[in-house]
């Protein structure tokens, strides 16, 4: 529009379409966008909702119950009568962040610690680290895992929650 030209009233009343912005403590905008992309992969009809039964079936077909039981159980938990009509992105995001924990609180970091400490021993040992690295698709040798433990564990063998909390809240790594 030229400087001296009068604006068209229909142009003034049009607001640009904006996507709803989601904020979750402990998640960056990029992380939320990654979760949205995962949600959209399963929202094949673009309705804004996904069927938890279909999502669970898709996870089973991809072998997630064996490859990544944490993620599989999170999805399986969504498959309940309350969600029989489908779940929207808000519910999906809440389910993920509730299960994974908020990295900005001690309670949230403890939830993350529990994902590592699947045997409930109160520490993260080499077997826990090996399982997590496999679930994440990392191929780490025993020597690498031992070195991680030696650096992270105050006793050099097992990571206590205090060790884990210190690592998670440390701002720089040497």
Image (cartoon, helix red, strand yellow):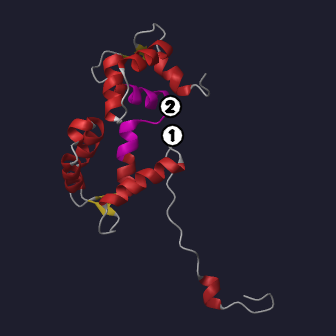
Between 160 and 87, the one lying in front of the other is: 160
Element marked by disc 1: loop
Residue 57 on image: x %, y %? 18, 51
Is the magenta region chiefly helix, strand or loop? helix
Label 1 and label 2: CA atoms lie apart by: 8 Å
The span picked out in magenta is 95-113
Which residue: 51% across, 50% down? Answer: 30
Q: Is residue 68 left or right of residue 23?
A: left
Which residue: 36% across, 35% down? Answer: 136
Which residue: 27% across, 20% down? Answer: 119
Between 106 and 66, the one lying in front of the other is: 66
Cβ atoms under marks 1 and 2 closer than 8 Å: yes
Q: Is residue 94 left or right of residue 77?
A: right
> Relative to 75, does residue 116 appear above or below in the rendering?
above
> Relative to 36, does residue 138 appear above or below in the rendering?
above
Q: Earlier in the sequence, mark 1 or mark 2?
A: 1
Q: Quadrant of the N terminus?
A: bottom right
Which residue: 41% across, 51% down? Answer: 35
> Relative to 119, does residue 94 appear above or below in the rendering?
below
Instruction: Determine if the magenta segment contains residue 98.
Output: yes
Residue 26, numbered label: 1
* Mark 2 lies on residue: 105
Instruction: Determine if the magenta segment contains residue 112.
Output: yes
Residue 141, numbered label: none
Residue 94 on image: x %, y %? 38, 47
Between 90 and 33, the one lying in front of the other is: 33
- The mark tally for this picture is 2
Query: Local crowd at mark 2 within 10 Å, few (<14), some, or many (≥20)?
Result: some
Query: Local crowd at mark 1 within 10 Å, few (<14), some, or many (≥20)?
Result: some
> Relative to 80, does residue 113 appear above or below in the rendering?
above
Element marked by disc 2: loop
């Amino acid at each position: 529009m030229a400087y001296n030209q009068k604006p068209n009233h229909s142009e003034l009343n049009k607001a640009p379409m904006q996507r709803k912005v989601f904020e979750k403590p402990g998640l960056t905008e990029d992380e939320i966008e990654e979760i949205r992309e995962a949600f959209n992969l399963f929202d094949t009809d673009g309705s804004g909702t996904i069927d938890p039964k279909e999502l669970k079936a898709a996870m089973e077909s991809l072998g997630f119950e064996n490859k990544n039981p944490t993620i599989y159980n999170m999805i399986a938990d969504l498959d309940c009568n309350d969600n029989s009509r489908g779940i929207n992105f808000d519910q999906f995001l809440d389910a993920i962040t509730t299960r994974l924990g908020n990295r900005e609180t001690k309670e949230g970091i403890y939830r993350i610690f529990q994902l590592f400490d699947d045997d409930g021993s109160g520490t993260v040992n080499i077997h826990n680290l090996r399982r997590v690295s496999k679930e994440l698709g990392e191929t780490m040798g025993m020597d690498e895992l031992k070195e991680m433990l030696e650096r992270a564990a105050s006793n050099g063998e097992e990571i206590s929650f205090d060790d884990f909390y210190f690592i998670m809240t440390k701002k720089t790594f040497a």
